[in-house]
């Protein structure tokens, strides 16, 4: 593993003085999902000097501005501090990506016929099988998008 930069938190990150239960988002209180430091580094739109090689969580709560937070409650990154718009934060928006590796937008799924939807699923699966996905780096949630794609179909229907 690479060595990380050291330094104090910049003004553009948020520090929290109150502590929540470990694993809970300090802004909304929802349980987060663990993501790798590589995911956070790939998504951060702030200097990487301010990230620590520690545990980060992904907050998927739509109304919460926090995308990533440190388990020790010392830092958050908000929607304005990441490189990509986050599908979980903007599920109602048609122009946000739902598949970051193969660049499918939510509108692609919402407007798709059953045959087009199946073609999108087949394309994503083919890309995964060919080793062309990089969900852990390109998807803000740090994992495969297929669950989101299937949920979008269920919600459409």
Image: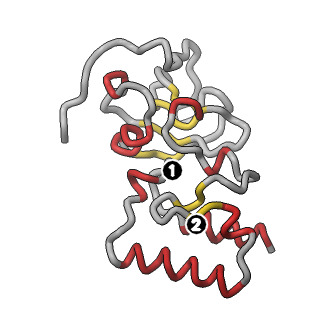
Q: Is residue 154 above or below residue 7?
A: below
Residue extending furthest toward the right: 157
Give the CA distance from mark 2 to mark 1.
11 Å
Image mark for residue 18: none
Quarter in which the N terminus is drawn:
top left
Q: Is residue 105 left or right of residue 82?
A: right
Q: Relative to the observer, which residue lies in front, 72 or 11?
A: 11
Q: Position of residue 27 (x, y in %)?
A: 64, 27
Q: Give the color scheme: rainbow, by chain, secondary structure or one colour.
A: secondary structure
Name the residue beneath numbered marker 1. 141
Mark 1 Cα shell of 10 Å, populated few (<14), some (14-19), many (≥20): many
Q: Residue at x 49, y 39 (%)?
A: 83
| Residue 105, percent from left and from top | 62, 61
Q: Residue furthest bottom?
A: 115
Residue that label 2 marks = 147
Q: Position of residue 77 (x, y in %)?
A: 52, 29
* Residue drawn at x 59%, y 46% as measured from the top left: 86
In this rendering, the answer to whether 101 lies above or below 32 is below
- Considering the numbered disc 1 on the image, is that residue within a helix, a strand or a loop? loop
Residue in view at x 71 percent, y 84 percent = 114
Residue drawn at x 34%, y 43% is 38
Instruction: Give left or right: position of 44 versus 32.
Output: left
Relative placement, left or right, of 103 versus 129 is right
Within-10-Å neighbours for mark 2: few <14, some 14–19, many 20+: few
Estimate the x, y position of residue 35 in percent, counting from the top left.
Answer: 43, 46
Q: Nearer the viewer, residue 22 or 13?
A: 13
Q: Quadrant of the C terminus?
A: bottom right
Query: Circle 2 — which element?
Result: helix
Looking at the image, is mark 2 or mark 1 earlier in the sequence?
1
Q: Is residue 24 above or below residue 97?
A: above
């Amino acid at each position: 593993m690479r060595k990380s930069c050291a330094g104090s938190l910049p003004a553009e990150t948020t520090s929290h003085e109150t502590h929540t239960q470990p694993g809970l988002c300090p802004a909304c209180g929802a349980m987060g999902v663990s993501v790798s430091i590589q995911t956070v580094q790939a998504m951060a739109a702030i200097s990487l000097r301010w990230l620590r090689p520690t545990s980060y969580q992904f907050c998927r709560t739509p109304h919460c501005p926090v995308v990533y937070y440190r388990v020790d409650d010392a830092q958050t990154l908000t929607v304005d501090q990441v490189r990509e718009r986050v599908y979980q934060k903007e599920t109602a928006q048609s122009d946000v990506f739902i598949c970051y590796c193969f660049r499918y937008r939510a509108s692609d799924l919402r407007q798709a016929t059953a045959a087009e939807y199946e073609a999108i699923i087949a394309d994503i699966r083919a890309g995964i099988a060919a080793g062309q996905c990089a969900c852990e780096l390109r998807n803000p949630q740090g994992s495969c998008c297929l669950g989101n794609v299937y949920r979008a179909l269920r919600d459409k229907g």
